[in-house]
Image (tube, rainbow, N blue to C red):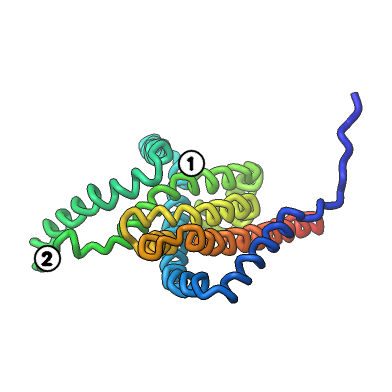
Amino acid sequence: MMAAPTNDKEDFPWWLAAVVLIGLYFGWNVVTDDLYLQVLTTLSKGIQTTIFVTIVSFTLASLLGLLLAVGAGSKWLVIRQVTRFYVEVVRGVPIIVLLLYVAFAMAPALVEFRNWAGDFLGLDPIRTRQFPLIWRAIIALMVAYSAFISEVFRAGLQSVDEGQIEAAQALGLNRWQTFRLVIFPQAIRTIMPPLGNDFVALVKDSSLVSVLGVLDVTQLGKVIAAGNFRYFETYNVVALIYLTMTIGLSLLLRRFERHLRDKEKVE
Protein backbone atom coordinates (compact mmCIF):
# COMPACT_ATOMS: atom_id res chain seq x y z
CA MET A 1 0.00 0.00 0.00
CA MET A 2 1.49 3.29 -1.11
CA ALA A 3 1.85 6.04 1.45
CA ALA A 4 0.07 9.29 0.79
CA PRO A 5 2.40 11.92 -0.68
CA THR A 6 3.49 14.57 1.76
CA ASN A 7 4.06 18.20 0.92
CA ASP A 8 6.09 20.27 3.34
CA LYS A 9 5.19 23.48 1.54
CA GLU A 10 1.94 25.07 2.57
CA ASP A 11 -0.72 25.55 -0.07
CA PHE A 12 -1.24 29.05 -1.36
CA PRO A 13 -4.24 30.49 0.51
CA TRP A 14 -6.55 30.87 -2.48
CA TRP A 15 -9.50 31.04 -0.07
CA LEU A 16 -7.95 34.13 1.51
CA ALA A 17 -7.41 35.70 -1.90
CA ALA A 18 -11.09 35.10 -2.71
CA VAL A 19 -12.16 36.65 0.60
CA VAL A 20 -9.91 39.67 0.01
CA LEU A 21 -11.40 40.19 -3.46
CA ILE A 22 -14.93 40.00 -2.09
CA GLY A 23 -13.95 42.37 0.71
CA LEU A 24 -12.45 44.82 -1.80
CA TYR A 25 -15.65 44.69 -3.84
CA PHE A 26 -17.83 45.55 -0.88
CA GLY A 27 -15.24 48.06 0.35
CA TRP A 28 -15.49 49.81 -3.01
CA ASN A 29 -19.27 49.87 -2.64
CA VAL A 30 -18.89 51.46 0.79
CA VAL A 31 -16.70 54.20 -0.67
CA THR A 32 -18.80 54.89 -3.76
CA ASP A 33 -22.34 54.14 -2.53
CA ASP A 34 -23.90 56.52 -0.01
CA LEU A 35 -26.24 53.79 1.28
CA TYR A 36 -23.37 51.43 2.12
CA LEU A 37 -21.47 54.28 3.76
CA GLN A 38 -24.49 55.27 5.82
CA VAL A 39 -25.02 51.68 6.98
CA LEU A 40 -21.34 51.28 7.92
CA THR A 41 -21.35 54.57 9.84
CA THR A 42 -24.33 53.43 11.90
CA LEU A 43 -22.96 49.92 12.44
CA SER A 44 -19.62 51.30 13.65
CA LYS A 45 -21.37 52.23 16.90
CA GLY A 46 -22.19 48.56 17.43
CA ILE A 47 -18.63 47.40 16.77
CA GLN A 48 -17.52 48.86 20.10
CA THR A 49 -20.31 46.97 21.89
CA THR A 50 -19.42 43.71 20.13
CA ILE A 51 -15.73 44.05 21.03
CA PHE A 52 -16.55 44.98 24.64
CA VAL A 53 -18.94 42.05 25.11
CA THR A 54 -16.48 39.61 23.52
CA ILE A 55 -13.39 40.67 25.48
CA VAL A 56 -15.09 40.94 28.89
CA SER A 57 -17.04 37.69 28.59
CA PHE A 58 -14.01 35.80 27.25
CA THR A 59 -11.78 37.08 30.07
CA LEU A 60 -14.30 36.08 32.73
CA ALA A 61 -14.96 32.74 31.03
CA SER A 62 -11.22 31.98 30.90
CA LEU A 63 -10.79 32.69 34.61
CA LEU A 64 -13.81 30.56 35.51
CA GLY A 65 -12.72 27.85 33.07
CA LEU A 66 -9.27 27.69 34.67
CA LEU A 67 -10.84 27.27 38.11
CA LEU A 68 -13.08 24.50 36.76
CA ALA A 69 -10.10 22.75 35.17
CA VAL A 70 -8.15 22.89 38.42
CA GLY A 71 -11.23 21.64 40.27
CA ALA A 72 -11.55 18.73 37.84
CA GLY A 73 -8.12 17.55 38.97
CA SER A 74 -8.78 18.06 42.67
CA LYS A 75 -8.10 15.27 45.12
CA TRP A 76 -11.54 15.87 46.64
CA LEU A 77 -14.32 13.79 45.05
CA VAL A 78 -17.03 16.37 45.76
CA ILE A 79 -15.15 19.14 43.92
CA ARG A 80 -14.48 16.87 40.94
CA GLN A 81 -18.13 15.86 40.69
CA VAL A 82 -19.42 19.43 41.05
CA THR A 83 -17.14 20.71 38.29
CA ARG A 84 -18.09 17.79 36.01
CA PHE A 85 -21.80 18.45 36.71
CA TYR A 86 -21.37 22.13 35.78
CA VAL A 87 -19.45 21.40 32.58
CA GLU A 88 -21.77 18.69 31.29
CA VAL A 89 -24.98 20.60 32.06
CA VAL A 90 -23.81 23.90 30.59
CA ARG A 91 -22.40 22.26 27.45
CA GLY A 92 -25.71 20.49 26.92
CA VAL A 93 -27.77 23.69 26.81
CA PRO A 94 -27.83 25.88 23.65
CA ILE A 95 -26.19 29.26 24.13
CA ILE A 96 -29.30 31.17 23.10
CA VAL A 97 -31.31 29.29 25.76
CA LEU A 98 -28.66 30.22 28.34
CA LEU A 99 -28.92 33.85 27.26
CA LEU A 100 -32.68 33.88 27.76
CA TYR A 101 -32.43 31.95 31.03
CA VAL A 102 -29.81 34.26 32.52
CA ALA A 103 -31.54 37.41 31.31
CA PHE A 104 -35.09 36.62 32.41
CA ALA A 105 -34.79 33.93 35.09
CA MET A 106 -31.36 34.18 36.72
CA ALA A 107 -31.12 38.00 36.72
CA PRO A 108 -34.34 38.53 38.73
CA ALA A 109 -33.16 35.86 41.19
CA LEU A 110 -29.83 37.66 41.60
CA VAL A 111 -31.64 40.94 42.20
CA GLU A 112 -33.82 39.33 44.86
CA PHE A 113 -30.76 37.86 46.54
CA ARG A 114 -29.01 41.22 46.45
CA ASN A 115 -32.04 42.93 48.01
CA TRP A 116 -32.26 40.23 50.68
CA ALA A 117 -28.57 40.68 51.54
CA GLY A 118 -28.99 44.45 51.30
CA ASP A 119 -31.55 44.40 54.11
CA PHE A 120 -28.83 43.23 56.49
CA LEU A 121 -26.29 45.73 55.16
CA GLY A 122 -28.64 48.71 55.10
CA LEU A 123 -28.62 49.07 51.29
CA ASP A 124 -31.53 50.41 49.28
CA PRO A 125 -33.37 47.79 47.18
CA ILE A 126 -32.98 47.76 43.41
CA ARG A 127 -35.28 46.65 40.60
CA THR A 128 -34.61 44.05 37.96
CA ARG A 129 -34.74 46.65 35.19
CA GLN A 130 -31.70 48.31 36.78
CA PHE A 131 -29.68 45.21 35.86
CA PRO A 132 -28.30 46.23 32.42
CA LEU A 133 -29.06 43.82 29.58
CA ILE A 134 -25.49 44.00 28.34
CA TRP A 135 -24.21 42.58 31.65
CA ARG A 136 -26.85 39.86 31.59
CA ALA A 137 -25.55 38.92 28.13
CA ILE A 138 -21.94 38.97 29.34
CA ILE A 139 -22.78 36.70 32.29
CA ALA A 140 -24.61 34.27 29.98
CA LEU A 141 -21.68 34.07 27.53
CA MET A 142 -19.28 33.69 30.45
CA VAL A 143 -21.29 30.76 31.82
CA ALA A 144 -21.59 29.12 28.39
CA TYR A 145 -17.97 29.44 27.29
CA SER A 146 -16.41 28.68 30.67
CA ALA A 147 -17.58 25.07 30.27
CA PHE A 148 -15.85 24.70 26.89
CA ILE A 149 -12.74 26.59 27.95
CA SER A 150 -12.41 24.44 31.08
CA GLU A 151 -11.99 21.38 28.86
CA VAL A 152 -9.24 23.18 26.93
CA PHE A 153 -7.41 23.98 30.17
CA ARG A 154 -7.97 20.47 31.53
CA ALA A 155 -6.48 18.86 28.41
CA GLY A 156 -3.51 21.22 28.55
CA LEU A 157 -2.83 20.58 32.23
CA GLN A 158 -3.06 16.81 31.74
CA SER A 159 -0.57 16.99 28.84
CA VAL A 160 2.25 17.83 31.26
CA ASP A 161 4.33 14.75 32.00
CA GLU A 162 3.78 13.32 35.48
CA GLY A 163 7.53 13.06 35.95
CA GLN A 164 7.82 16.85 35.78
CA ILE A 165 5.39 17.18 38.66
CA GLU A 166 7.15 14.53 40.73
CA ALA A 167 10.51 16.22 40.12
CA ALA A 168 9.09 19.57 41.28
CA GLN A 169 7.73 17.98 44.44
CA ALA A 170 11.07 16.29 45.04
CA LEU A 171 12.70 19.72 44.93
CA GLY A 172 10.42 20.86 47.74
CA LEU A 173 7.94 22.95 45.73
CA ASN A 174 4.43 23.15 47.13
CA ARG A 175 1.28 22.63 45.01
CA TRP A 176 0.92 26.31 44.07
CA GLN A 177 4.60 26.67 43.15
CA THR A 178 4.46 23.46 41.11
CA PHE A 179 1.43 24.73 39.21
CA ARG A 180 2.83 28.24 38.64
CA LEU A 181 6.45 27.33 37.81
CA VAL A 182 6.21 23.88 36.21
CA ILE A 183 2.74 22.84 35.07
CA PHE A 184 1.21 26.01 33.65
CA PRO A 185 4.24 27.25 31.62
CA GLN A 186 4.36 23.89 29.82
CA ALA A 187 0.59 23.51 29.45
CA ILE A 188 0.11 26.96 27.93
CA ARG A 189 1.66 25.82 24.64
CA THR A 190 -1.05 23.19 24.30
CA ILE A 191 -3.77 25.49 25.58
CA MET A 192 -3.25 28.59 23.45
CA PRO A 193 -4.27 27.34 19.95
CA PRO A 194 -7.69 25.91 20.96
CA LEU A 195 -8.20 28.83 23.34
CA GLY A 196 -7.69 31.19 20.42
CA ASN A 197 -10.24 29.22 18.40
CA ASP A 198 -12.75 29.66 21.23
CA PHE A 199 -12.12 33.41 21.16
CA VAL A 200 -12.85 33.55 17.43
CA ALA A 201 -16.02 31.51 17.98
CA LEU A 202 -17.09 33.89 20.75
CA VAL A 203 -16.77 36.86 18.39
CA LYS A 204 -19.42 35.22 16.20
CA ASP A 205 -21.59 34.00 19.07
CA SER A 206 -21.61 37.50 20.55
CA SER A 207 -24.17 38.29 17.85
CA LEU A 208 -26.68 36.25 19.89
CA VAL A 209 -26.90 39.08 22.42
CA SER A 210 -29.04 40.89 19.87
CA VAL A 211 -32.01 38.77 21.03
CA LEU A 212 -31.88 40.75 24.29
CA GLY A 213 -31.90 44.06 22.46
CA VAL A 214 -28.23 44.83 23.10
CA LEU A 215 -27.13 47.27 20.40
CA ASP A 216 -24.29 45.27 18.89
CA VAL A 217 -23.54 44.98 15.16
CA THR A 218 -26.29 42.42 14.53
CA GLN A 219 -29.00 44.31 16.42
CA LEU A 220 -28.14 47.60 14.70
CA GLY A 221 -28.21 45.75 11.37
CA LYS A 222 -31.74 44.55 12.10
CA VAL A 223 -32.83 48.06 13.09
CA ILE A 224 -31.32 49.60 9.96
CA ALA A 225 -32.82 46.97 7.65
CA ALA A 226 -36.24 47.40 9.26
CA GLY A 227 -36.03 51.14 8.57
CA ASN A 228 -34.70 51.27 5.01
CA PHE A 229 -35.87 47.84 3.77
CA ARG A 230 -32.50 47.41 2.03
CA TYR A 231 -31.72 43.99 3.51
CA PHE A 232 -29.15 42.96 0.89
CA GLU A 233 -26.92 45.99 1.34
CA THR A 234 -27.34 46.12 5.13
CA TYR A 235 -26.52 42.50 5.84
CA ASN A 236 -23.65 42.57 3.35
CA VAL A 237 -22.00 45.19 5.55
CA VAL A 238 -22.85 43.24 8.72
CA ALA A 239 -21.29 40.08 7.27
CA LEU A 240 -18.23 42.03 6.09
CA ILE A 241 -17.64 43.40 9.60
CA TYR A 242 -17.79 39.96 11.21
CA LEU A 243 -15.61 38.44 8.48
CA THR A 244 -13.00 41.15 8.96
CA MET A 245 -12.83 40.48 12.70
CA THR A 246 -12.89 36.68 12.58
CA ILE A 247 -10.53 36.17 9.64
CA GLY A 248 -8.11 38.73 11.03
CA LEU A 249 -8.08 36.90 14.36
CA SER A 250 -7.73 33.52 12.62
CA LEU A 251 -4.68 34.72 10.68
CA LEU A 252 -3.09 36.06 13.87
CA LEU A 253 -3.81 32.74 15.57
CA ARG A 254 -2.17 30.76 12.75
CA ARG A 255 0.88 32.98 12.92
CA PHE A 256 1.09 32.42 16.67
CA GLU A 257 0.76 28.63 16.24
CA ARG A 258 3.58 28.70 13.67
CA HIS A 259 5.69 30.65 16.15
CA LEU A 260 5.07 28.02 18.83
CA ARG A 261 6.01 25.19 16.45
CA ASP A 262 9.22 26.95 15.43
CA LYS A 263 10.08 27.56 19.09
CA GLU A 264 9.57 23.86 19.90
CA LYS A 265 11.88 22.87 17.04
CA VAL A 266 14.61 25.18 18.34
CA GLU A 267 14.29 23.75 21.85
Image coordinates for residue 11, horizontal then vertical, percent: 81, 51
Q: Nearer the viewer, residue 208 or 147?
A: 208
Q: Nearer the viewer, residue 86 or 179?
A: 86
Q: Residue 2: which quarter of the image? A: top right
| Residue type marked 1 | Gly
Labels 1 & 2 near each other (Cβ < 8 A): no
Image coordinates for residue 229, horizontal then vertical, percent: 41, 60
- Residue 200 seen in the figure: yes
Q: Mark 2 points at which residue?
A: 121
Q: In terms of secondary structure, where does tag 2 sit?
A: helix
Q: Residue 132: which quarter of the image? A: bottom left
Q: In the rendering, which numbered label is found on residue 73?
A: 1
* Image quarter (top left, top right, bottom left or bottom right) of the C terminus: bottom right
| Residue type marked 2 | Leu
How far is the residue under mark 1 from the one under mark 2? Answer: 37 Å
| Point 23% across, 54% down: residue | 107
Q: In the rendering, which numbered label is found on residue 148?
A: none
| Crowdedness near tag 2: few (<14), some (14–19) or many (≥20) residues, C-alpha within 10 Å | few
| Point 45% across, 61% down: residue | 230
> Left or right: 164 with respect to 74?
right
* Image quarter (top left, top right, bottom left or bottom right) of the N terminus: top right
Q: Which of 163 and 149 is in front in this view?
A: 149
Q: In terms of secondary structure, where does tag 1 sit?
A: loop
